[in-house]
Amino acid sequence: MKESFYIEGMTCTACSSGIERSLGRKSFVKKIEVSLLNKSANIEFNENETNLDEIFKLIEKLGYSPKKTLAEEKKEFFSPNVKLALAVIFTLFVVYLSMGAMLSPSLLPESLLTINNHSNFLNACLQLIGTLIVMHWGRDFYIQGFKALWHRQPNMSSLIAIGTSAALISSLWQLYFVYTNQWSYGHYYFESVCVILTFVMVGKRIENISKDKALDAMQALMKNAPKTALKMQNNQQIEVLVDSIVVGDILKVLPGSAIAVDGEIIEGEGELDESMLSGEALPVYKKVGDKVFSGTLNSNTSFLMKATQDNKNSTLSQIIEMIHNAQSSKAEISRLADKVSSVFVPSVIAIAILAFVVWLIIVPKPDFWWNFGTALEVFVSVLVISCPCALGLATPMSILVANQKASSLGLFFKDAKSLEKARLVNTIVFDKTGTLTNGKPVVKSVHSKIELLELLSLANSIEKSSEHVIAKGIVEYAKEHDAPLKEISEVKVKTGFGISAKVDYQGAKEIIKVGNSEFFNPINTLEIQENGILVFVGRAINEKEDELLGAFVLEDLPKKGVKEHVAQIKNLGINTFLLSGDNRENVKKCALELGIDGYISNAKPQDKLNKIKELKEKGRIVMMVGDGLNDAPSLAMSDVAVVMAKG
């Protein structure tokens, strides 16, 4: 049995790898993958030996909180940014008190210094107060770190908690000797505690921002899914939750509403926006017997459909699941990092303890407490220098710097993995509509059997009444050629075919039709050799015969500069591939025009995903460039994903 869920409380790769190791040792667990970035886990287990509740209990024993869904974070009085700002302020305050005299004794009042310009008792107490405030803002490190240590799964938080706690205890111990006048001054580590906590808090804040961005993508997809639907029951329509829909239910779909589950039209017809599936801007005509898919949008008519899948098995849910699985899967380099982190923290703790014991024995001083203090300093030093290590700080800091540089160039990376692999890419897969092309059909040419301006005027007057994306292209072309508008009446729309109206033509009111070839019963022909989207204009002679007056050929043009950019990519020795939901002729024409090496047409999300998998299995490092929901699974599965915001 396979299950997916979320885990709260993970702070580093040692946490996620610790959960994997602990559960992986259980005989009933076949496979377990935990993603720190997504706070998620995918598990495959023997359902005859255990259940998800028992697995949750095992994870809770490790000190983490497993959940089926991500809970909204509780609003706190201070936001994370405010907490971080306060931590920085008090850290600077403690550093000023402890280090200011080293730069220049005049920087501190004499009341805070000893005769030898060391921190006196009052100074140390002020440092202690500032340190306790910073420790309060970083208390999660202590809660999670000691809890993980208690469950024998030490992580980076454990290292921070032990190191800073040891530094605090050492400082308090020396402060006691100063208070009892046994020592004139002490070597305090208050500033070390503050600096360590603040640096790591900065790193964690950057890391959390990256995590939130990754999770927002998933949540945005889930928001596209309708929550309710209209179910027909006893000739009445009632609103029901989508999760309650079962196969065989009859649903009514209103204009402008999204399809709740996969199904089949049983009454009526409509034009559906399937761009979330195919990426194509043109609505798709659907009639009785045609299949419809969850997440697609009904345009302007209502119809009845019969559910053929429940919500869990419908198309949109499958897309979300594919994205989740692709994002949660780990690359080999990630597994290597997990292995390193699993031994890093215990090794550092062991080395620190060993150093403490060795220095306690070898320090040539007769006073035990002096020996103990020196050994403790060494112990703290080993832990302190290990706390803000590359695993905890350098990576998010490098991401920040790289993202700042990239953002100035109009590039935005999701994580370090994308940055790392971008230089290795040897295959780029493109979506077509909206990525390489503008996504808005424009008139390429006009074929007319009457005066051109008259044809444009007829088409402009009628298409002005339509919101169809093709109609907008024709109207825009007519405006550019100053085609006048005529009065129209008796406007009729035949969904999926075209639009007609009575218009003044050659001195008489005639029914003029604008639409695809299936909208006409022509008595004449137009010789058109060009590829593209064909829209005909004709006059209705009677109910069974039409006279074609002309035709528009439209196409979705490539964006400016795309051909040159593709050529530059190929000059780098990178293979290019085009995946599109458009028809074969249009995709082939686009690929040839732009010089792209290969293409697949009529591609659904699963087809695109399968092609990405195929390329990766052949050892290719794949970059996917797309812009729509239909590209989301492929973008998640590719080694590097590029989402086109605009242009």
Image (cartoon, helix red, strand yellow):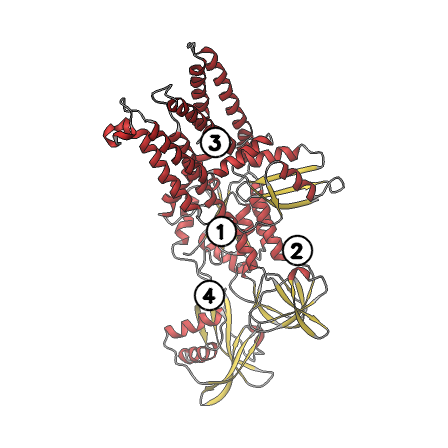
Instruction: Determine whether, in the image, residue 500 is placed left or right of residue 243.
Output: left
Q: Secondary structure at mark 1?
A: loop
Dot placed on the residue nearer the N-terminal end, 3 or 2: 3
**In the depicted view, which residue is nearer to us: 83 or 534?**
83
Q: Which mark is residue 312?
A: 2
The answer to which quarter of the image holds residue 42 is: top right
The residues bearing labels 3 and 2 have C-alpha atoms spaced at a distance of: 43 Å
- 82 shown above or below 384: below
Dot placed on the residue nearer the N-terminal end, 3 or 1: 1
| Residue farthest toward the right in the current orientation of the protein | 48
Q: Position of residue 628 (x, y in %)?
A: 51, 56
Residue at 51% in and 74% down? 536
The residues bearing labels 4 and 1 have C-alpha atoms spaced at a distance of: 47 Å
Q: Residues within 10 Å of mark 2 (few under 14, many from 20)?
A: few
Asked if the residue at tag 1 contacts the one at tag 4, i.e. Cβ–Cβ closer than 8 Å, the answer is no
Going by the numbered disc 4, the residue's amino acid type is Pro
The residues bearing labels 3 and 1 have C-alpha atoms spaced at a distance of: 26 Å
Q: Secondary structure at mark 3?
A: helix
| Residue underneath mark 3 | 160
Dot placed on the residue nearer the N-terminal end, 4 or 1: 1
| Residue farthest toward the left in the current orientation of the protein | 106
Quarter placement of the N terminus = top right
The residues bearing labels 2 and 1 have C-alpha atoms spaced at a distance of: 32 Å
| Residue underneath mark 4 | 441
| Residue underneath mark 1 | 75
| Residue farthest toward the bottom in the current orientation of the protein | 508
Q: Secondary structure at mark 4?
A: loop
- 331 shown above or below 73: above
**In the depicted view, which residue is nearer to us: 429 or 566?**
429
Asked if the residue at tag 4 contacts the one at tag 3, i.e. Cβ–Cβ closer than 8 Å, the answer is no
Going by the numbered disc 3, the residue's amino acid type is Ile
Dot placed on the residue nearer the N-terminal end, 3 or 4: 3
